[in-house]
Amino acid sequence: MYCRVEKGLAANTIESYATDLQRLVDWVFRNGLDLQKLSSRDLREWLIDLGGEKLSENSKRRLVSSVRGFYKFLMFEGHIDKNPAEDLVSPQKGQYLPRFLNKAEIEQLLMAPDTSTEYGLRDRAILELMYASGLRVSEAASLRIGDVDLEGGIVTTTGKGSKTRRVPVGASAVEWLRSYLVLRRKKEITGSDRLFTNSAGGQIDRQTIYLAIVRYAEKCGFKGVSPHTLRHSFATHLIQNSANIRSVQQMLGHADISTTQVYTHITNVQLKENYERFHPRARNKGE
């Protein structure tokens, strides 16, 4: 109504805006987020994820315009206090590097759950697995017990486009999964083959994982951390340690390697920052 009456937009334009916003809604749903509580960082991560889709420059510009208009409307109507899309612009190559945690921060986050409790042990297993394998939150939530081969250290998951991939699981994650499964079997949960369950033995949902990760991150004093941060950290640390980018692409399930290449930009930025910080003549002014 607002677009048609107040803005006087044509029906085709309104339909295009609706299609654009649905892309954002779908991404928000997949990641267990709240559309009205997205931050500027969330929107930048959304744009990065769109890099895997073959969109024209015009489509990208319209997407950004649609989202900016949507949040401007929410501000106008009083639904939100701050516009996260105010400074949003179409991403250029190398822009909008995703949020990731360094190795010390990852260790701190992994240790945040109280593993003496049932939910703490489950959450530690989830954190370990998501960081070890770069799983999306939706992929972690939908895992079945048979999807994880603890002996072989492999998890099988179905991602975007119903594409199945097999990803290695590190020794630390395997051990925490073993501990969690021992507890889960003691509870004698019947009728469910889901790996991660709630108190009733049913499938855990994306929102539960999202809220848990945000809570643990806040406990550690980290801002802007989401389930996707673990995925970004997984990929960044592999690239930093000279992993083959094609292998990282396969493990992440990216259809287009250009989406994976954003992590090479991250490491390049870090290299430059470290050089300027530690090299004695990096900032030489001719003294």
Image: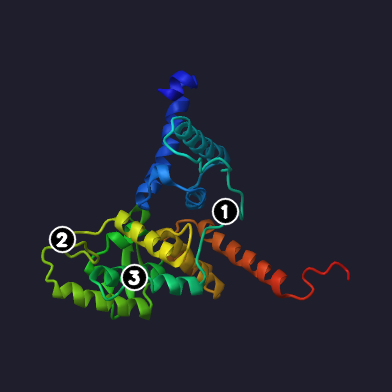
Q: Residues within 10 Å of mark 3 (few under 14, many from 20)?
A: many
Name the front one of labels 1 and 2.
2
The first of marks 3 and 1 along the sequence is 1
| Camera-nearest residue between 5 and 16 | 5
* x and y percentages locating residue 228 in the rendered image: 43, 59
Say which mark, if any, is on residue 96.
Answer: 1
The first of marks 1 and 2 along the sequence is 1
| Residue 112 drawn above or below residue 73 | below
Q: Secondary structure at mark 1?
A: loop
Identify the residue under disc 3.
113
Name which residue lies at 48% across and 37% down: 71
Identify the residue under disc 2.
200
Name which residue lies at 34% across and 61% down: 212
Q: CA distance from mark 3 to mark 1?
A: 30 Å
| Camera-nearest residue between 219 and 205 | 219
Q: Residues within 10 Å of mark 2 (few under 14, many from 20)?
A: few
Q: Amino acid at mark 3?
A: Pro
Left or right: where 65 falls relative to 120: right
Name which residue lies at 52% across and 41% down: 85
